[in-house]
Amino acid sequence: MKNKLYKGLLIIFAIFVVLLPVTIATADSGWGSSYHSSGGSSHHSSGSSSHHSSSSSHRSSSSSRSSSSSINGGEPLTPLETVIMVIFLLFILFIIVMTFNGIIAAFIAAVRKSNGAIDTHMNIMTQDRVDKIDPSINIENTLKEVFDLFTKVQDAWSEFKYDELRKYLSDELFNNYKMQLETLELEDGKNVMGDYKYISGGIISIDKKKNLEELRVKLHVEMKDYVINTKTNKVTHGEKNGIMDNTYIITLERSLNNEITNCPDCGAKIKNQASQKCEFCDAILVKGASKFVMVKKETIKSGYK
Ligand SMILES: [Zn+2]
């Protein structure tokens, strides 16, 4: 029994030693670009969660070390002490396993994330496939529109233009960004962004549900992205002369079949929204789709060039 425990502990400790640099590395990458995140809402949280797990793994490593040193104390143990020791070890093992579950889960998530980049690359939709779902979507134009939206969001984020952000973001994402920006403002921070360059992109999925259309787009961009302190003008995060090379999965949404209030030809009020023609001049009424707003921005790759 004890042997098994030791063996288990040893294996877990070995895994731990192997994994430790990995978790530290992820925590580090979270720091450098924790602010770049107007899109970083997801990036920010992943950075801090991996940081959390690395700190908790620290805890478990020190406790396992202290337990092993007490075992090697030398004095023979009484049966009661042995039972207590076994219970104690089981407890430690339990904590370690729980900690590891977290780390392994985070690790698997990280691997999945990077695999996702490959997957989504493979799964980029062709115009043929897009046409089967929504023929009104032209891939090239849509990618231009999404990149344009992306740069507008980043600029508004950089300049604390809340009204602008409101126009381009879903309510939930807006509230999320607003909270992050208010914190940044309190710290006299400013996220300088610019020199956006479109590298590549593709549509991953189109999903129509009732009057809503959801679009997922992969976007690979380059840009300037660092944080300064507005009082001292010193760079606090990132590199002033560095070029960030980021890949995102951006989720967008728009409502379809927006109501038409007036006839585009004669200007008469449209009373019956179900009708396809103006009752006065017979003009054909085409219900429009609203512009896409950003619902989510996930960073799947981020780093300096
Ligand atoms: Zn009319």
Image: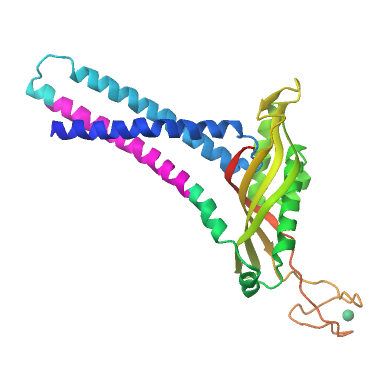
Ligand 1 is located in which of the four quadrants? bottom right
- Split into 4 quadrants, where in the image is the C terminus? top right
Res 43 → quadrant:
top right
Residue 95: tell me if it is visible: no
Residue 246, position in %: x, y? 63, 44
Residue range of the region highlighted in magenta in the rendering: 83-112
- Residue 286 higher or lower than 227, as above or below: below
Q: Nearer the viewer, residue 170 or 76?
A: 76
Q: Is residue 138 visible?
A: yes
Quadrant (top left/top right/bottom left/bottom right) for the N terminus:
top left
Q: Quadrant of residue 132?
A: bottom right
Q: Position of residue 291 (x, y in %)?
A: 74, 60
Q: Residue furthest left?
A: 79
Name the quadrant containing residue 133: bottom right
- Left or right: residue 72 versus residue 143 is left
Q: What residue sits 72% from the left and 49% below the top? A: 198
**154 or 286: which is nearer to us?**
154
Type of secondary structure dominating the magenta stretch = helix
Residue 15: image location, x then y, percent: 32, 35
